[in-house]
Image (spheres, rainbow, N blue to C red):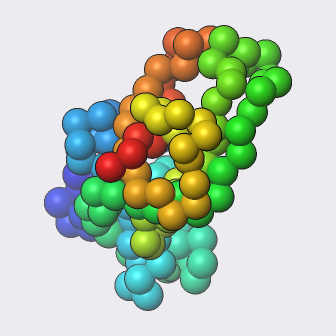
Amino acid sequence: MTDAETGVPDAGFDDWIDAAEEGEAYYLECPEGHGSLPPRRVCPDCGATDLEAVPLPDTGEIETFTVTHVPTPAFEDDAPYATAIANFGPVRLTGQILGIELEAIENGLEVGIEISVSETTGERVLAFAPA
Ligand SMILES: [Zn+2]
């Protein structure tokens, strides 16, 4: 799925989830070193168009999180759950935190990417688990 000339995978977010599920998560890097996630054709920071796929670091750090006890209907069977923003260096990812007691979650916690299935919608979602 990689265009040999530009190195940019011709991929949408579903394909990115596929890659992440196989332990091959990546991000897009522009010549200035800004990171973004697919589907992107243009660097959101500087407008550069020659983006390159770079492997995502294996682990990131929880930067901030919130615990949801009363979710939107789309996630009602998943509650209570924690949603976090994790800093993976060049990019920040948002997802649920799995495999840990909600009380044990703290900022700075090291996590890896986990692809989970929403218990409510059956759709694959990006999640984190303690590294
Ligand atoms: Zn840029």
Q: Could you tell me if residue 8 is visible in this image?
A: no
Q: How many marks?
A: 0
Residue 44 falls left or right of residue 4: right
The extreme bottom residue here reads 32
Quadrant, the N terminus? top left
Quadrant hosting residue 4 = bottom left
Question: What x and y, as percent, mark residue 129?
Answer: 41, 41
User: Residue at the spot x=53%, y=34% of the render?
Assistant: 101
Residue that protrudes farthest toward the left in the picture: 4
102 in relation to 31, above or below? above
* Horizontal side of residue 72 vs 84, given as left or right: right
Who is closer to the viewer here, 23 or 98?
Answer: 98
Q: Position of residue 10 (x, y in %)?
A: 35, 48
Q: Is residue 78 visible?
A: yes
Q: Residue at x 30, y 62 (%)?
A: 57
**Where does the image place residue 12, in percent across and percent down from the top left?**
45, 42
* On screen, residue 86 above or below 72: below
Q: Is residue 67 left or right of residue 38?
A: right
In the displayed image of the protein, which residue is found farthest to the front?
A: 103
Q: Nearer the viewer, residue 30 or 99?
A: 99
Q: Is 20 placed above or below 41 here? A: above
Question: Compared with residue 29, is residue 80 higher up or lower down, i.e. above or below?
Answer: above
Residue plotted at (39% across, 45% down):
130
Percent position of residue 67, x then y: 71, 38
Q: Residue at x 57, y 54 (%)?
A: 106
Would you say 96 lies left or right of 53 here? right
